[in-house]
């Protein structure tokens, strides 16, 4: 009997193995509708951040063993060089880790807060409002007799020299704290919580709820993170938490961190250099004016500085109004 010729068209092709990242089990655990699940993204982010920072500390110990070995007491002033080096290095590490996460998640790096088309104008506006609002708080304390200016400490070229040094230092502080707290972490936590709200309540406002829930969580942690500062007080912790919420408000209005970075930098600069008051209990060297608080700490701020005064609540309300009136609404975001 003749054999029937083999019809290759009828021969079933061998099944190709399904890559693990395309399997349903993998997708369910690690991948959601928007890519890598927020929880895993945050875990990878913190792991990379910790590993790179640990490596940077080890490298710093090798390069400057004497500086690392010298212990600092809570009453010691912060050196300008320490802020300029350490804060910028930490910011660059945060920038690097966020860039890595943008590649892993295949997103534009700008969505994490440093994007937008009006970076410089927003940053400069934040700088101006930071000095203005801190000056208003200091003026209130001066007019109520809760703060006294003792003397002027710097003259001539030293004013511009140290003013520029400290401005560079506090811009580093603003960049680091805003991008670390309200950059990738804020974006990803908001995304994850929005997914939970959508899954649990099927609400069209899941993005809004996710953003503000994450803002509250981050602001609570930001406020509590100031507990280790020397001279910190309960009102000072409240002040830090409220400031975080205000910065989240500016992020919500504009979609970027540039206004908050400018405001944060200028606020700290005006406290520490311009008026020479304590900032969360820390007084820096080479400031322009010498001052001291008078009266009950809850009113004057005491050793915490103006941020420890209950008048900070009024200032926070004014800052919120400034953001509402001067920054575009949600529908005008440029990122």
Image: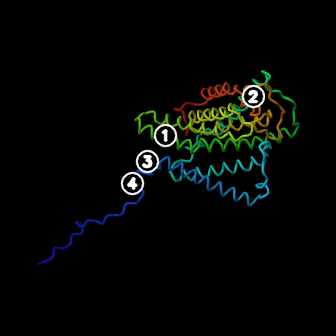
In whole angstroms, how far apart are the C-alphas of marks 3 and 2? Answer: 50 Å
Q: Looking at the figure, which quarter contains the C terminus?
A: top right
Give the image location of residue 27, x and y in percent. 41, 52
Judged from this view, the residue extending furthest toward the top is 144
Which dot marks residue 297?
2
**In the rendered view, does 203 fall on the left or right side of 56?**
left
Side (left or right) of 89 relative to 75: left
Question: In the image, which is nearer the foreground, mark 2 or mark 4?
Answer: 2
- The answer to which of 137 and 133 lies nearer the viewer is 137
Marks 1 and 2, Cα distance to the nearest angstrom?
A: 39 Å
Is label 4 in a helix, a strand or a loop? helix
Q: Which residue is mark 3?
A: 32
Label 4 neighbourhood size at 10 Å, few (<14), some (14-19), many (20+)? few
Q: Residues within 10 Å of mark 1 (few under 14, many from 20)?
A: many
Q: Secondary structure at mark 3?
A: strand
Where does the image place residue 258, in percent across and percent down from the top left? 63, 39
279 lies above or below 55: above
Crowding at dot 2, Cα within 10 Å, few <14 / some 14-19 / many 20+, comes out as: some
Query: Looking at the picture, how far across and down is residue 251, in whole percent?
Result: 58, 36
Please name whichever residue, 25 or 322, is drawn nearer the observer in this view of the structure. 25
Residue indicated by mark 4: 25
Mark 3 / mark 2, whichever is N-terminal: 3
- Residue designated by label 1: 193
Can you tell which quarter of the image residue 231 is in?
top right
Seen as rendered, the residue at the extreme bottom is 1
In the picture provided, is 220 more to the left or to the right than 309? left
């Amino acid at each position: 009997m003749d054999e029937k010729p083999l019809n290759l068209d009828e021969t079933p092709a061998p099944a190709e193995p399904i890559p693990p990242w395309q399997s349903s089990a993998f997708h369910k655990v690690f991948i959601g509708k928007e890519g890598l699940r927020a929880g895993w993204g945050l875990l990878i982010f913190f792991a990379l951040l910790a590993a790179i920072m640990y490596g940077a500390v080890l490298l710093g110990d090798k390069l400057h063993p004497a500086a690392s070995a010298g212990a600092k007491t809570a009453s010691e002033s912060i050196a300008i060089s320490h802020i300029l080096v350490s804060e910028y290095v930490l910011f660059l590490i945060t920038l690097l880790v966020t860039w890595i996460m943008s590649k892993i998640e295949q997103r534009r790096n700008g969505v994490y807060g440093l994007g937008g088309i009006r970076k410089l104008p927003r940053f400069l506006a934040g700088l101006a409002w930071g000095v203005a609002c801190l000056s208003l708080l200091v003026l209130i304390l001066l007019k109520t007799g809760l703060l006294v200016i003792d003397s002027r400490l710097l003259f001539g070229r030293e004013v511009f020299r140290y003013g520029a040094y400290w401005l560079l230092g506090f811009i580093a502080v603003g960049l680091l704290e805003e991008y670390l707290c309200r950059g990738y972490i804020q974006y990803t936590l908001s995304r994850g919580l929005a997914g939970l709200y959508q899954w649990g309540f099927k609400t069209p406002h899941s993005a809004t709820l996710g953003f503000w829930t994450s803002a509250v969580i981050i602001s609570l942690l930001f406020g509590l993170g100031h507990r280790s500062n020397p001279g910190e007080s309960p009102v000072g912790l409240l002040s830090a938490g409220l400031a975080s919420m205000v910065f989240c408000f500016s992020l919500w209005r504009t979609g970027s961190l540039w206004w908050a970075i400018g405001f944060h930098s200028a606020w700290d600069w005006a406290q520490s250099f311009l008026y020479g008051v304590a900032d969360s209990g820390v007084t820096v060297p080479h400031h322009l004016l010498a001052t001291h608080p008078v009266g009950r700490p809850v009113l004057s701020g005491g050793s915490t500085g103006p941020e420890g005064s209950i008048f900070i609540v009024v200032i926070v309300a004014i800052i919120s109004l400034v953001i509402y009136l001067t920054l575009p609404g949600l529908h005008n975001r440029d990122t």
